[in-house]
Amino acid sequence: MNELTFILIGIGTGSLYALVAQGLVLIFRGSGIVNFAQGAFALFGAYVYYNVAEHAGASLLVCLLVSVAATGLLGVLVQLLVLMPMRRASSLSRLIVTLGVLVTIQAAAVVIYGDRNLVVRSLLPTNGIELLPGARIGADRIIILAIGLVTTAVLWAVFRYTSYGRVTTAVAQSPRTAATLGHSPDRIAAVNWGVGGAVSGLAGALIVPLTNLEPINLPLIVLPALAAALVGGFASFPLAFVAALLIGVAESLMALHLNQPGVSQSVPFLVVMVLLMVRGRGLPLRSHLLDRLPGVGDGRVRPVPVLVVVALVALAMLTSGEAASYLTVTVTMAILCLSVVVVTGYAGQVSLAQYVLGGVGAFVAATLSSGHGMPFLACLALAVLATMILGGLVGVPALRLRGINLAIVGLGLSVAVYSLLLNNERYSGGVDGIPVEPVTILGWEVDPFFHPERYALLCLAALVVVALMVSNLRRGDIGRRLLALRSSERAAASLGVNVYWCKIYAFMIAAGIAALGGTLFAFMQSIVLTAQFGVMSSVNLITVTVVGGIGSLPGALVGATLIPGGLGTWLLNGAGLQVWLPLIGGVSVLLVLRADQGGLADLNVGLYRSLRDRLRSLGNAAEVSSDHPEPDHPEPAPGTRRDISPVRVSPLELRVEDLGVRYGGVVALEGVNLRVKPGTVHGIMGPNGAGKTSLVDALTGFAQVAAGTAYLGDRRLDGCSPMRRSRLGLRRSFQSVELFSSLTTRDNIAIGCDDGAPSSYITGLLWPKGPRLSEAAEAALEKFGLSRVLDAPVESLSFGDRRLVAIARAVASAPSVILLDEPASGLADRESAELAALVRSLADDWGMAVLLVEHNINLVLSVSDEITVLQAGRVLAHGTPAEISADQSVVDAYLGQSTTPGEVVIS
Amino acid sequence: MPKSPIWSRNARVGAATLALLVTSLGLAACGGDSADSAESTGAAADPIVIFQTNSFSGQVSNKPQTKTGAQAAVDEINKAGGVNGRRLELVTCDNTGDPNVTNTCIKKAQEVKAAAFVGSAIYFPGTWKFLEQASIPYLLGTGLTPDEYKATNSFPLSGQAGWYYGIADYLKKLGASHPAIIRCEIDACAYGETLLAEALKQQGMAEARSVVAPLSTTDYSSFAAAAMRGDTDAVVVTGSEATATSQAKALYQQGFKGKVISVSACISTPAVPNLGDAGKDLYVVGLLQPPTQGTPLMGTFIQSMDAVDKGAKKDELALSAYAGVKLFAEVAKGLPEVNATTVLDALRNAKAGAYDIGFTAPLPGATTSPIAELPQLKFSPTVTYSQILDGTIRESVTGFHSPFAAV
C-alpha cells in the first residue's frame, strides 16, 4: 500500500462530501443562505430510502427516486414555510434557523429510532475493485464519484447557459431588481431549495449503505462539505467538487502519515481558514450590503424585576438540592450566553466558538487546581485571563472576514481547539479526567456535591456581576463603539473608532466571560472532563441565545433555560418528556425566529407592552405609551438653552497631488490634482463612473492609492488608516448614509465625539459614561435642527433627518476637512436648499474645508467656491462655478446646457 | 469626577443583589450536609427499592433496552414471590449521558433509600467519587472506566479489561501475531488501546498498530487501509456498533484477509445483518454468554424481555441489566435485613463463587484481582469467546474464560 492507494481512497471519500457540497452551493446561489441543515437533509433522505425499502418492499431504484423526491419536497417546504417569512430577517437569524432545522430533523430521528443502527441495503455494488496493484476502492465509491461528476457538470451548464441559471444568479445578487423585471425571488429560491434538497437526498440514500443509518453522525457530513463549498466561494460547482475531493484526499493521507487524535478533523478547516484570510478584506467594500440585524436591548437593569428574579431563584436553590443542581447548570449557561450577547449581539461578530472557549477556561482552571493546588478563585482568575488571550487570537480572522465566512472559520477553530486540546487524552487526563481540589472560598466550603445550594448561590452571584458588567458595557462608550461596528464598520472607522481593536476586544471580553461560565459549570464535578465542551454545543449555545434574544440581557437568560441539563430538563423530566426536549428546542427555534428575529425576549417585551397599553387604554390613562427609552440626559427646559454658536475648527488645507486609484485592471482615477482651502467649498461633479466616490474613498483611506498622494496641512496621508485620518481632522459622510441603526441620534453623534481613550475599555466595564456631546456636536445639532429628535432611534427618522444626522455626526469632532459624498441624494427641493445653506455654513461659520461630491448640479454650482469636474477618472475641468458653467467640454460631457449658478435643480 | 447616572443605578442594583445573595449564602452556611445516608428502616411489607440510572434518551447514546432488561428481571422475581417475601421495586432515572444529571440521580437514589444500583452506566470520574461516598452497591456495571474497578462499592463485569485482554488471548488462540486496532479519539477508546497494549505484551505478541478514526468519520476506507498495511494479520474494530460495523465493512471492501475481531458492546446480534458478508467469521469477545446462545436461561431472558417490550434490543447491555437484578436477588436472599449497607457487606465478604446466576462464571470470580491497579476486577474476571456463524453470534469456545492467565 502506498500513497497512491490512499489518494484513490481519499477521492472516494471526497466524492461523498462533493454531493453534499453541491447542494450547499446550489441553495446559496439561489437564496443567499448557507444551509447548515444540508447533512440533516441527507439524513432525512436516508430514512425515507430505508423506510420505503423495508416497509413498501419497492425496488431499490424506486426507493432512491422516492428519497430524492421527498427530500426535494422537504427543501421546498423549508424555504416556503420557514425562510420565506424571514426574508427581511438578518443573515444571522437565517443561519440560526437552518441550525434549528438541523436540530429538528436530528431530534425527530432520535425520538423515532433512538440510536439504533439500521441496516440499509445498497443500490450500488459494494465489492472492492483493484484499480492498481494494492490499490482497492469500493465500486460504490466509483459510481458515486461518477454521479458527482455528472451532477457538477449539469449544474455548471445550467447556471452558465440557461436563462434559469442567469435569473437565479440575478436574483441572488439583487432580489429587488430581479423582481421588478418580473422574476419572483421566492419562486427561484424555492426551486433551488428543492433541487438542493433532492441532491442531498440522493447523497443520503447512496451514503448510508456505506456507513450506517443512525441519527448522530451523518448530519456532521455538512462540515467538510461546508469547507469545500467555501473554497468554491459558494459560487463555483466545479471548484467545490474539486475541493471536496482534495479534502477527502487530505484526510486519507493524514490517516496514513499523521495518525494523531484531532489532526484529521482540524487540518481541513485550518487550511480553509488560511485561504479565506488571504482572500478576505480588512474593511468591507462599498458593495458590502448592510445586513438587517436583530434588535438590541438598551442594556438597562430594571432593579425591581432583577431583585425579584434573583430572590426567587435563590429561594429555589436554598429549598432543594435537586433544584440547586439544575439551576446551577442554567445559571452557568446564562453566563455563557452573555458571552454570545457581547461578541455577536453587540459587536456583530458571529462566533461559534464560545462553548469551546468555556472548555478552555475549565481546562486551565482544572490544570492549575490539580497540578498546583491553587485556590479556586485564583484558578478562576487565571483561567479567565488565559482564555481572554486565546479569545483575542480567535478574533483575528474577524479582522478580514465577516458574516458566514467568519461563522464557518469560527466553527473550524472550535473543531481544532476541541480536537487538539479538550478531547485529546494527552491533555484532558483521558478517562480519569482532571481531578480538582474541593471548591472553597476563603476557607469556606462551597463543594457542589455536599453543599449544592452554596455553590449554586456562588454561581448566581457570578451571573449577577457579569450581567451588570455587560449592562455597563452596553450603556457606555464601549457599547456604542461595538454597536457602531456592528452596524457599519466603514462609518465607525471614518469616525475614529479603532475597528480592529474593538473586534479583538469584543472577542477577548466574550472569551473571558465564557471561561468564567465554563469553569463554574465544569467544577460542578470534582473531576473536570474537558471533552464535554463539544463543538455542537457551541452551535447550540448561539442558537438558544438567538432564540432567547441575542441583543439583550434578558435574552441570554431566557436562552439559557433552553439548554439541556438545566431548568428545562428539570421541568420536563418529571413528566417523562426528556427525550422530546431537543425536538421541542429545534421547533422553538423555527417558530420563535419566524415570529420575531429579536427572539423570545423581544416577543415577551412586545406582549408586555401590548398588555400594558391595553390596560392603560381601559383605564383611560392620560399618558401615551412610548417605546423609546427614557433619556439619560433630559432635554434642557425652555429658557435654559445655551447660546450655541458654531465652533471654529483648526484650519488645514487638503491638497491632492497626482492621485491615482485602480481596481484590478480598471482605472478609477488618474492624475487628479486639487486643493481644498479652509473656509471654502470645493465641489466635485461628474457622470456616473467618473470616480467621484473613489476620490472620497481614496482620500479617507477606504481605497488603496495606486499613485500620487494627499496632504492634510503639512502631513502626508500615505499609509494612514481611516481611523487615523479621522483623528487627524479628516471626516466624511457616506452616499448610503450608514447610520448606526441600533442607536439613537444622540448616541450616533456621541460616537462622532468619542475620543477613543484606551482606558475606557477597562473603566467602561465598571463605571460607564453616558453619551457626551462636544461643543461642536451641540452646535451642529442646533444648526441642523436635530435637537428635537435627539433621543429618537435613527431608524424612526425621516430620510432627510437621517442625512442630516450623518453629516452632524461627521462634524461633531470639529474636523478641519469634511468630505460630503452626495449628501443631497434623495432629498426634496426644500431639503436640498436647506442642505445647501448648511454646507455653506460649514465653510463660512466653522471655517472647514469642504469637499462636496454631488449629482445635484445646481446645488454644487450654488454653494461651491471652486469646482472640479471628473470624467472617466480624470479631471475634465477646474474653475469657479461661472467658469465651469461656460466650459464647453463640461457642457458637452455633463451639463447639457448652461445652468445659472445658485439655481437648485428640482430632483 | 461627577458620578455617572448609569454607574449609580447599576451599583445600587449590584449592591442590593449581592446583599441578598450574601444573606442567602449565610442561610446556606447554617444548613448541614445535604447527603443522606442510604439506610433503610423499611417494614417487612415495604418493597425493596433498587435503582437504575442510564442514558435512556440521550442524543448521543440511548440504551432503553437496559431499562427493559432490568424490569423484565424484576417482574420475573416478583412473579416468583419477590425477595424474602418482599416485592422488588425498580426506580429509574434517565441521566441522558449528562454528568450533572447523573449526580442528581445518585442523590435521588439516596433519597429513595435504594438498596443497589443495577443496569446502570456511569462514565464520569467525578460522579464515581460521589457514588462511592453514597455507599450504594453498584452491580454488574460494564466496566468502561478505571473508576468502576477502583470504587469499593462497584462489582463490575470484566469490561474493558476483559475485552482487551480477551482479544489478546483469543487472537493468540487463533494464531494471529501482528494485530492492528482502529479506535476512536475519545478517552474511553484510548484507554482500551492502553489495555490492549499491555495485554499483547503479556502474551508476548507484537504491539498493535494503532489507527485513530474520529467518531464523526463518514468513510473508514482510508483507516482500514492504514490498519491493513504491512504484516497485519488481525484488526480490532471498536468504538460503537455504528463505527465497528463500518470499520469491518471497510476492511472487507479493501480485501482484508486476516482476522477481524471486536467486543460485545460493538457487535451484538442486532448488528449482524448490517455487516453482510463482512460479518462472516468475525470474532467477538463478550462479558456474558451471547443472548442468542439458545440455552434455556437465554430463552427465559428473551421471553421476559418480550413481555415488557417486544421491540427492545436483546443485546448484552439488556442482559447485564437483567443479570444485575438476578444477582441482587441472589445476594439479598436470606439476608435478615435488605438495604444498601447489608447488601454491600454481603458482597464485600462473599467467598469466591458464592453466587451463581448462570450468565457469568460463579461470582465473585477470584479473591484477588489479576491487575493490581483495578482491584474490583476480581469480582467477574471472565469473558466468552464467540464468532458470527450462520448469521448469529455463538460461542466458538464454550464456557467462561479468564484472559488474565498470562498476567
Image: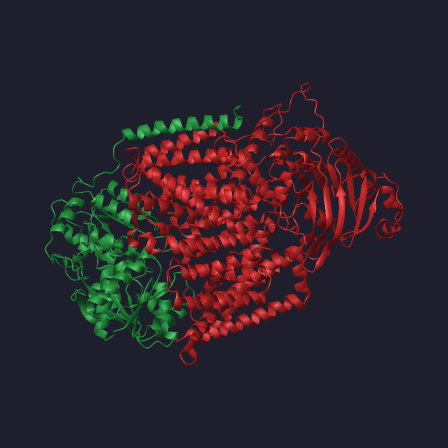
Residue B213, x across and y down, in percent: 38, 64
Residue at 56% in and 51% down: A400
Identity of the residue furthest to the top in this view: A639
Instruction: Tell me, yes or no, if residue A54 can be seen here.
Output: no
Q: What quarter of the picture does the N terminus of chain A occupy?
A: bottom left
Which chain is depicted green? B
Instruction: Tell me, yes or no, if residue A343 can be seen here.
Output: yes
Residue B284, x across and y down, in percent: 27, 68
Identity of the residue furthest to the left in this view: B351
Residue B319, x across and y down, in percent: 25, 59
Identity of the residue furthest to the bottom in this view: A133
Residue B282, x across and y down, in percent: 30, 72
Query: Total label count?
Result: 0
To which quarter of the image does residue B157 belong? bottom left
To which quarter of the image does residue B322 belong? bottom left
Per the rendering, the colour in which chain A appears is: red
**In the foreground, B329 or B25:** B25
Query: Relative to residue A768, is residue A338 depicted above or below?
Result: below
**In the foreground, A735 or B168:** A735
Q: What quarter of the picture does the C terminus of chain A occupy?
A: top right
**In the foreground, A264 or A218:** A264
Query: Relative to residue B100, is residue B173 depicted above or below?
Result: below
Q: How is the image coloured?
A: by chain
Relative to B92, is B397 on the left or the right? Answer: left
Query: Relative to residue A352, is residue A164 depicted above or below?
Result: below
**In the foreground, A405 or A281:** A281
Residue at 12% in and 48% down: B335
